[in-house]
Amino acid sequence: MREHVTHGFPPFWQRDAVILILGSFPSVRSRETSFFYGHPRNRFWQVLAAVRRQPCPQTIEEKKVFLAANHIALYDTLEACDIRGSADSSITNAEPADLHPILEGAAIRRIFTNGRTSQKYYDRWQAPVLHREAVCLPSTSPANAAWSLTQLTEAWSVINTELEEK
């Protein structure tokens, strides 16, 4: 059964963030923990740690320190929607997130989306307003089982180009 759900927690960013990574909408687990990529099978944190050649953060506080140290901002393309569990494929009545505060407050040079669903909503609502393109990276979701951790890490390594120019 679908329910109307709001995001539930704020974006993570700091003034010196140079990249913004956007998911589509937080999973049930992420909404429960009030932080991004909270499902233990989502490979987001493993991929970022491998790309940055750093230990994988475990706690929310470690994740925040990791993001800040690497100049990464995180949010989602949707602020609210009707959704069944965590299934992106069930999303209806989507409401876009307002990305202006992040883009006006941080030094964001590049925007990346985590998967095609996030890219679809970014292209529909944010790109026409922000006049900025986003680079679509393969989803780190466990639903994207076709991609191995090694393949994801290789694909996501493009973020290093922006981060190493910091």
Image (spheres, rainbow, N blue to C red):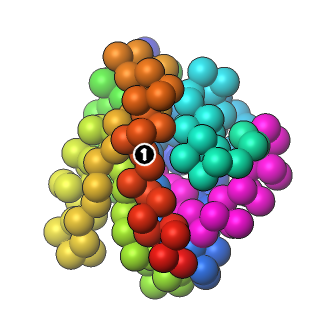
User: Which image quarter: residue 42?
Assistant: top right
Label 1: few (<14), some (14–19) or many (≥20) C-alpha neighbours in 10 Å: many
Front residue of 48/154: it is 154
**Residue 123 picture location, percent across and down:** 20, 55
Q: Is residue 51 above or below residue 150?
A: below
Horizontal side of 5 relative to 11 (left or right) equals left
From the image, which quarter does the C terminus lie in?
bottom right
User: Which image quarter: residue 115?
Assistant: top left
Query: Which residues, given as a range, are shown in magenta?
Result: 58-76
Q: Residue at x 55, y 63 (%)?
A: 73
From the image, which quarter does the N terminus lie in?
top left
Assign a secondary structure to mark 1: helix
Residue wearing tag 1: 156
Q: What is the tally of numbered marks visible in this picture? A: 1
Q: Is residue 109 above or below residue 93?
A: below
Taking the magenta stretch, the answer to whether it contains residue 78 is no
**Residue 26 picture location, percent across and down:** 52, 39
**Residue 140 picture location, percent across and down:** 46, 32
Q: Residue at x 48, y 76 (%)?
A: 165
